[in-house]
Image: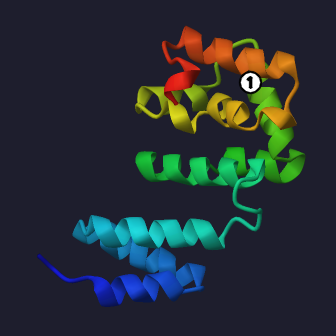
Amino acid sequence: MTDYSKQLAFIETCDIPRKLRQLLAQAKTSGTTVLEEAAFARLVELEPQELPGSLEYDFLRTTEAFERVIGTRLSPLRQKVAREGTEQVLLDIVLADAMSQDTRNRLDHGHPELTTEAIVLRHPSRFGAATLEAARTRLLEAGVHPRDL
C-alpha cells in the first residue's frame, strides 16, 4: 500500500486553488482516489467564500460534487447564481412546474442528496412552507423519500 502522507499533508495546507486543481487532475488521471478526494475537499473549502453550514456553501459543495460525478462544469447554473443569487435560483428550480433537467440528471446519477430540492429541505428556515412542500413533493414523485437523504 502506497504512503500518501506527504501529499496529503501538502494538500491539507495548500491555499492555492490553481495548484489544487492541478493535483486533482493528476490524481484523477492516475486513479489515486485518496489524493483526488483530498484535493477536491480542500478546493471546496477554499473556493466557497460562504460560511460552512450556510445555504450558499451547501449549494456550492453539492454543485461541485455533482460536477465531479459528471465530469463537466455547470457553467449556466453558476452564471445564474452569480446574477440572481443562490436562494432565488433554488426557488426558481423548486417552484417550476416541471422537474429541472439538473434535478433529473442528479437523480439519474443516483445522487438525490445533491438535488436543489434536497438543499432546500436542509435549510428550512430560508424558505416558506409552499417551497418546502414543493421540494418534498418533487422528491417523493421521483421515488425519493426526504428522510432517506
At x 86% / y 47%, what residue is drawn? Answer: 85
At x 66% / y 28%, what residue is drawn? Answer: 117
Asked if one can make out residue 133 in the rendered structure from this viewpoint, the answer is yes
Q: Position of residue 5 (x, y in %)?
A: 30, 85
Residue that label 1 marks? 94
Q: How many marks?
A: 1
Q: Position of residue 137 (x, y in %)?
A: 66, 11
| Residue count near mark 1 (Cα–Cα under 10 Å), binned few <14, some 14–19, many ≥20 | many
Determine whether, in the image, residue 75 is placed left or right of residue 105. right
Q: Secondary structure at mark 1?
A: helix
Type of the residue with mark 1? Val
Q: Position of residue 63 (x, y in %)?
A: 60, 48
Which residue appears farthest toward the left when viewing the image? 1
Which residue appears farthest toward the top when viewing the image? 141
The image quadrant that residue 114 belongs to is top right
Asked if one can make out residue 96 in the rendered structure from this viewpoint, the answer is no
The image quadrant that residue 34 belongs to is bottom left
Q: Quadrant of the N terminus?
A: bottom left
Determine whether, in the image, residue 49 is placed left or right of residue 119. right
At x 34% / y 75%, what residue is drawn? Answer: 26
Up-down: is 138 above or below 37? above
Front-most of 9 and 16?
A: 9
Up-down: is 129 above or below 127? above
Q: Position of residue 11 (x, y in %)?
A: 45, 82
The image quadrant that residue 37 belongs to is bottom left
Determine whether, in the image, residue 119 is placed left or right of residue 140. right
